Amino acid sequence: MRNFLSDKVVNLKPSGIRKFFDIVTEMEDAISLGVGEPDFDTPWFIRDEGIYSLEKGRTFYTSNSGLKDLRKEISNYIQRTQQINYNPDNEIVVTVGGSEAIDICLRAVINPGDEVVIPQPSYVSYEPCSVLAGAKPVIIKLKNENEFRLKPDELLNAVTDKSKVLILPYPNNPTGAIMEKEDLEKIAKIIKEKDLLVLSDEIYSALTYKGRHVSIASVDGMKERTILINGFSKAYAMTGWRLGYACGPKNLIKQMTKIHQFAIMCAPTTSQYAAVEALKKGDEEVEKMRQSYNQRRRFLMDAFKKMNLDCFEPYGAFYVFPCIKEFNMTSEEFATRLLREEKVAVVPGTAFGDCAEGYLRISYAYSIDNLKEALFRLEKFINRLRVS
């Protein structure tokens, strides 16, 4: 019998995130600081709306692009937070999480031979989704000394006549880096000059700790060449509800909706009704969670300073990205030994790109008590390494 598997799929590397957490689930007294998932429950008023929709029998398909009421609320949300106007009728599509939006965006615009420019370290799905869409990924290696922000010269050096899409992953997973307005304005000039489309993944936009998040779509001349992707998983603690959205020019959203139509039909109906309520009434709850994450962020940065562990200060998402190069071992070796010797799970930086060797992703979407215990164990571990 012949081999029925696709070479393209077989050659994809599996995600480097899950490995350690399959071990953690079977390890007694282990603490995981690796999963990028809020430790808060979905706010009750959001859950209640989901329950109510089920009680009312609202279990049918919605339109392919999503509930009209939800698209209106998304439009309102983007307007009040970013001062960008998106027409809910033809410039917004509701997706199964932000991850589906990334996938269908790339599939809608890529032709064979096109290049997708991807700054790394960054979310694990960008590179494989680009490959599956038929593109060649072109990697920009972001630098610690630049706080992992994308610099104009780095973008210029990466762009060729085959470049079509720039993925802009800010606030960033795994580094927690942000791009401020002046940063975005500098790279916007190059984007327009080189005639690129931007896929702006803003799933952590509500979780910023230095001013307010600025979308590149709000920069002059950028709305028409940006697909803005966001969702409900992180800000509203709704990971399991699997709901995201994409906003952009109607000609692009139309083609993305076509793929979504054939592959998915529509996002989960119950989740959509709950999301309407989240956008209408959720600002206060999001702010409470943001403040709690910020407290934990400051706690970790202070702890790293006391243990002389190098880590730039991140201002977004809920991750820190400490450097462990002083210990002369790979990120995978460090993470493996930390798990075995101290029962603390973190993610090797290399899960987010080869250029992240020598770093770890640590999530602070956990209780202060868990963070305190994990940091106590981490300090014991690195103290042993320093005297060995």
Image (spheres, rainbow, N blue to C red):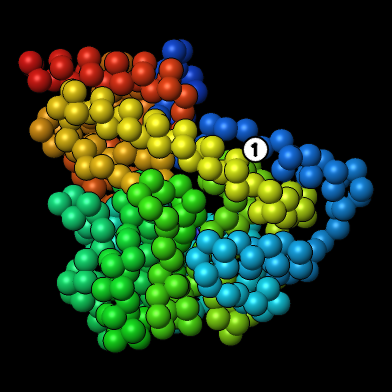
304 and 381: which is toward the camera = 304
Compared across the picture, whether 125 is left or right of 261 comes to left
Residue drawn where x is 29% and y is 86% of the image: 193
Residue drawn where x is 25% and y is 28% of the image: 302
Indicate the quadrant containing the N terminus: top left, top right, bottom left or bottom right: bottom right
Can residue 355 be seen here?
Answer: no
Q: Residue furthest right?
A: 56
**Mark 1 lies on residue:** 42
Residue drawn where x is 85% and y is 48% of the image: 53
Q: Estimate the x, y position of residue 206 in percent, counting from the top left.
A: 49, 51
Residue drawn where x is 49% and y is 72% of the image: 227
Q: Estimate the x, y position of residue 296 in percent, counting from the top left.
A: 39, 30
Q: Residue furthest left?
A: 387
Q: Estimate the x, y position of residue 172 in percent, counting from the top left.
A: 37, 52
Q: Is residue 72 above or below residue 344?
A: below
211 and 381: which is toward the camera = 211
Compared across the picture, whether 355 is left or right of 176 comes to left
Indicate the quadrant containing the C terminus: top left, top right, bottom left or bottom right: top left
Q: Mark 1 falls on what kind of element?
A: loop
Q: Is residue 372 above or below residue 45?
A: above
Type of amino acid at the residue the image marks with label 1 = Thr
Q: Is residue 145 above or below residue 376?
A: below
Can residue 80 be seen here?
Answer: yes
Compared across the picture, whether 202 is left or right of 52 comes to left
Quadrant in the picture for residue 178: bottom left
> Callout 1: few (<14), some (14-19), or many (20+) C-alpha neighbours within 10 Å?
many
